[in-house]
């Protein structure tokens, strides 16, 4: 018996925007990607994109907003299935200006967190003082 010839399919020229965002690991699920698109958080080639089924091609420019983070990227590849993070990083190139701005904002947020630490549980010395205060209030 002869083996059947492998059918080679040409690489895709277009992909749904929600599946591309999912495959490129900007969102954990396709439904989260769709919700972001319909919520106006994604811009395709400087135009608002409201449909998750909108086609994305190599060379398209995407503006992605997720929380306080903003990416400005150019699509470099298409991938139908979600792969590893290293493969996902080859699907896009981030603009240097947007990358510098994102890193600057991250550094500023880090400095703010360092200056204003979130309140945590009391240390041992403070707990001892609190217990003593509670005992005094119960005894009186």
Image (cartoon, rainbow, N blue to C red):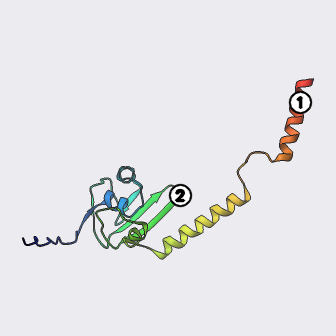
At horizontal 73% and vertical 48% (from top left) the residue drawn is: 119
Left or right: where 119 falls relative to 58: right
**Does residue 34 sit above or below 93 in this rendering?**
above
Q: Tag 2, which secondary structure?
A: loop
Q: Nearer the viewer, residue 122 or 110?
A: 122
Q: x%, y% of residue 24?
A: 38, 64
Going 35% across and 53% down the picture, which residue do you hit?
30
Instruction: State the count of labels.
Output: 2
Could you tell me which quadrant the N terminus lies in?
Answer: bottom left
Which one is earlier in the sequence, the residue at label 1 or at label 2? 2
Q: Nearer the viewer, residue 64 or 19?
A: 19
The dot on residue 57 is none
Q: Tell me residue 19's x, y (percent).
A: 31, 58
Q: Seen from this angle, which residue lies furthest front?
A: 1
Mark 1 to mark 2 CA distance (whole Å): 46 Å
Q: Which residue is at 29% across, 53% downward?
A: 51
Q: Nearer the viewer, residue 23 or 3?
A: 3
> Residue 64: x and y, percent?
42, 61
Quadrant where the C terminus sits is: top right
Where does label 2 land, which residue?
68
| For residue 4, side relative to residue 48 (left or right) | left
Q: Is residue 49 left or right of residue 120?
A: left
Within 10 Å of disc 1 (Cα), the crowding (few <14, some 14-19, many 20+) is few
Query: Within the image, what quadrant is residue 55 found in?
Result: bottom left
Disc 2 residue crowd, few under 14, some 14–19, many 20+, Cα 10 Å:
few
Q: Is residue 69 above or below residue 39?
A: below
Which element carries disc 1, helix, strand or loop?
A: helix
Residue furthest to the left in view is 1
Q: Which mark is residue 135?
A: 1
Classify residue 88 as left or right of residue 16.
Answer: right
Q: Residue at position x 83%, y 46% from top?
A: 124
């Amino acid at each position: 018996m002869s083996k059947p010839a492998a059918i080679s399919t040409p690489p895709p020229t277009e992909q749904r925007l929600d599946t591309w965002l999912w495959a490129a690991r900007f969102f954990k699920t396709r439904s989260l990607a769709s919700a972001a698109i319909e919520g106006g958080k994604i811009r395709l080639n400087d135009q608002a994109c409201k449909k998750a089924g909108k086609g994305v091609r190599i060379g398209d420019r995407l503006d992605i907003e997720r929380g306080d983070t903003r990416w400005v990227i150019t699509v470099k590849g298409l991938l139908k299935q979600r792969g590893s993070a290293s493969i996902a990083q080859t699907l896009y190139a981030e603009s240097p200006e947007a990358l510098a701005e994102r890193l600057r904002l991250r550094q500023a947020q880090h400095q703010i967190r360092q200056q204003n630490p979130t309140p945590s549980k009391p240390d041992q010395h403070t707990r001892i003082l609190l217990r003593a205060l509670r005992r005094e209030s119960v005894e009186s």
